[in-house]
Image (cartoon, rainbow, N blue to C red):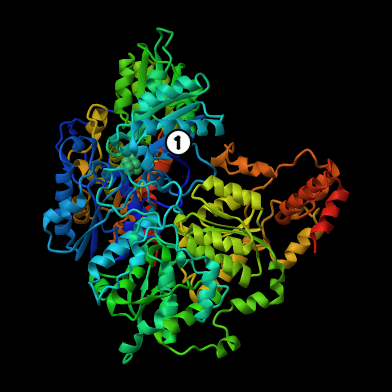
Amino acid sequence: MNGPLNLAGGIAGASLPTKGCTERPVLRERGQREVFCGLTGIVWLHRKIQDAFFLVVGSRTCAHLMQSAAGVMIFAEPRFATAVMEERDLAGLADANEELDIAVTRLIERRPDIKMLFLVGSCPSEVIKLDLSRAAARLSERYAPDVRILNYSGSGIETTFTQGEDNCLAALVPQLPEVETAAPQLLVVGALADVVEDQFARLFDAMGIDDVRFLPPRRARDLPPVGASTRYLLAQPFLGETARVLEQRGASRIAAPFPLGAEGTTLWLKAAADAFGVDPMRFRSATAAAEARAKRALEPFRAELSGRSIFFFPDSQLEIPLARMLSRELGMQLTEVGTPYLHRQHLAEELALLPGDVQLSEGQDVDRQLDRARAARPDISVCGLGLANPLEMEGLTTKWSIELLFTPIQGYEQAGDLAGLFARPLDRKTRLRV
Amino acid sequence: MQLTVWTYEGPPHVGAMRVATAMEGVHYVLHAPQGDTYADLLFTMIERRSKRPPVTYTTFEARDLGTDTAALFQRTLISAYERFQPQAMLVGASCTAELIQDDPAGLAKASNLPVPVIPLELPSYQRKENWGAAETFYQVVRTLAGSGRAAVADADALKPLGSDGVPGNPPLPAGISPTRGEIVDVGAAPQSSMQDAKAQDDSGVRASSISPLVGEMPGRAEGGDAASLRSGQGDQLGPTEKNARRPSCNILGPTALGFRHRDDVAEIRKLLGEIGVAVNVVAPLGASPADIARLGEADFNVVLYPEIAGVAAKWLKRTFGQEFTTVVPIGHGATRDFVAEVRKLAGLPTEEADEAAEPASRLPWFSRSVDSNYLTGKRVFVFGDATHALAAARVATEEFGFTLCGLGTYSREFARDIRAAAERYGVEALISDDYLDVEAAIAAAQPELVLGTQMERHIAKRLGVACAVISAPVHVQDYPARYSPQMGFEGANVLWDSWVHPLVMGLEEHLLGMFRDDFEFNDAAVPSHLGSGVRVAAEPAVIAAPQMAEATLASAPADTLTTPEIWHVEAEAELRKIPFFVRGKARRNTEKFAAERGLSEITVETLYDAKAHYSR
Ligand code: SF4
């Protein structure tokens, strides 16, 4: 599937190409990674769950990462902070636990609005084996029922970038109430922009799926129930651990590609519709107008982006769904598509849609990968903030990958915005005469 | 554990990166997990550097911990050497690697690389970015600058200074950093800035100048006793023996990610050229290991940023007998003092007369210009690193005619200097790296202008107070495209423009006061020359911007501004007729006045009684 796909026809239920084989070769790299750690997820999660607070138990490095990764120092006190470990915390675990209790007490006194507190583990807390799950249990007892205290790891030795969200949601799963009905309900899993979530809720409603809940919820007190009758649909490709614990609770996954682009969104919605036995006519009528709008929005970008080559440095695990969308819906040429971690099962539908000749890579050796990018001279390189300007200076056009996490890109109404993110750097190149 | 929202300084290895990135031909191998690679973006995004920092991270993972992270470090070191072919390497550990104790120094030694490898021991759980930069620069200099002439044995340098150290920094527990035996909390040289100023007076420097150089880097035995190193003794070690040529100096301290370092260097280089002093080496910014090896050839050193270069300068003095400057040339007066000091160190005749006729910056005349009268006594809160805070305090008071209502720093190493200066200005010193403390202090001081860092800019915006940025931590905005030094005479011009610009101008201020009911003169109006924008009301604290809906904590300091019951409605209404930028002062004065007299209610009469009482 190298050539642009004919998008004129209907996509829903489109025949999947047989050429993209899921057993394609993957280049595995083990060198220097240039990816954030899982703490970074807090930057969006603390906005998503409005009455939750994230306390990183870490070092000054962790605090500095949070502040730098946020791009700007966010004005107003955010709902996250770092308990910065100091020499005396390293002297013994008893002391560290005591110090942590003091920090949490201070925090809860100052922020009575907090209903849920996440203790987020970091590399230093894990290396000294500070047991945050015990700390969370101990503190939960003290503050129940006003504040629920949970923990997860966002450390760089355990997680890359978006895996922090995965661990956070996985920590929420045991807290979810047991479902009380045998009728199937839909659980959409993965943090989405509020506006996107609302659009999806309306679409599901129009299809007649009325019991739809989202994880994470906007408020910690609105935890969705889960159980054997729950069917869950992943909205993000990096939620392996969350999926695993949801299945332990009896929920079952609806396999689907991810809702990026017009086609991706349709396939994603269709998978849910089929699982819930929605009548195909009703599905069409619920989605046709929005899908057509999305395609119209994509059209001008297709003219700009078709035939252009793109190279993905590994970052958010969104790379494969994005590559699929860009190649199929906008006709872009994929060179290398890197991902920090390849979840073959969750990405099976995506891999099947990828063209056959794309080079996939998993993990990273940044210097060698830079050599490959220089050799490939792609029209656009998608990379992290540390690499973007140096590549620009070498004459390569870049797109910061972090923007893909901080911008609503999922769903029909955002398909054009998503394409725009990739078109803008090229547009800019052609405008500038300096 | 310290509960931290925002930090003023990064961890010490970021300081080391600032030195490594500033230099040429150096590569730093950092034993660190993958998330720590975020530090690259500080340089490539905030400073817009066009090259990646010369840093290779081992990015070890949890699964490596069980096996052999030491071997990973060694492999990474060797392949980084092969790929980048540096002339010297730095090796060290970030906070996490410090805990696993792989001993990068020993591993580097065992690797037998054909270039000098400088091991860095930066205690992450105790020290911060500037300390890390100072230590790294010191180690680079010590390793690469050679031994020079007979080292001056300095007994004082090894003398522990006892208990008056930095609070909250207990000694390292055993096993964290076994080789670092010399940890001594050296608070500061046992000499107050007042005495210091006198000492400088003797050496021809104006008494009012306050040098931040008295501060020592704690934990660094090389710190020594600054009193024994004062420039007054410089004469006998002067450059007479080398007088056949132009006197020369090194410029020490500028790094990557510094606040206007590049422009400061250009300005000071120009100034030195005008005086007739040649610049031998600038370091670390732009210096190669070979340049560092030439440091000893200069007659003396110019220390621009004592936080970073102070320790190295003292070592160079002991090793090569090079004197160093103690005046930081920020502001018109300090630049003149700096010129005098440089002339003295260079053995050049003092030269003063024609300066008065033709001042080298426009600041003196602009400040004397009648339209600047409105600046008189404006309340200014100063916060930043010690060097910039001290300099700003002097410039604000002596050169702008402001009144200092607060002075503080996050550089605990220089707490003593700031305390001494604050005492001179009659304000309380704020020594804190807790953003929330600083916010509370600013809200309480009710300044009309804040001179601070990007953090204080946020605070000031929220409180509706004007602000100019004078110090790191930096933001992309602190790297302007235009030439914009803080130092030297052009720097004084820049200070003038950037500090006056945010203020409401003279006549506009009067009109705002006279016609409070004009609908366009409401509190939300910003100074006319600042274009569109919404001023965030200081009272009550309501934060309007969309992403900051929750103001629970943020409002805490501002709560002190809300009206106590005591105000009569009419008095309250009258108070609102006073322009917002002086209203806080009026409110505070009136409440103080009422409290002192035990009044249970503030009426319009009380308001004006208080006004009469406080106006002189
Ligand atoms: S990689 Fe580890 S030490 Fe570094 S910021 Fe992330 S959690 Fe903290």
Where residue A62 sits, quadrant-wise, is top left
- The foreground one among B210 and B31 is B210
Say above or below: B338 vs B498: below
The chain to which mark 1 is attached is A
Q: Secondary structure at mark 1?
A: helix
Q: Is residue A50 visible?
A: no
- Residue A171 location, x and y as percent? 37, 25
Mark 1: which amino acid? Glu
Residue B277 x, y percent position in the rendering: 39, 84
- The residue closer to the viewer here, A355 or A106, is A106
Residue B199 is situated, as x and y percent measured from the top left of the image, at 51, 75
- Which residue corresponds to the image point at 29% horizontal and 76% vertical from the top-left? B320
Image location of residue B114, percent across then percent down: 12, 63
Determine which residue is flagged by label 1: A413
Measuring 41% from the left and 44% from the top, which residue is drawn there? A63
Figure quadrant, ligand 1: top left
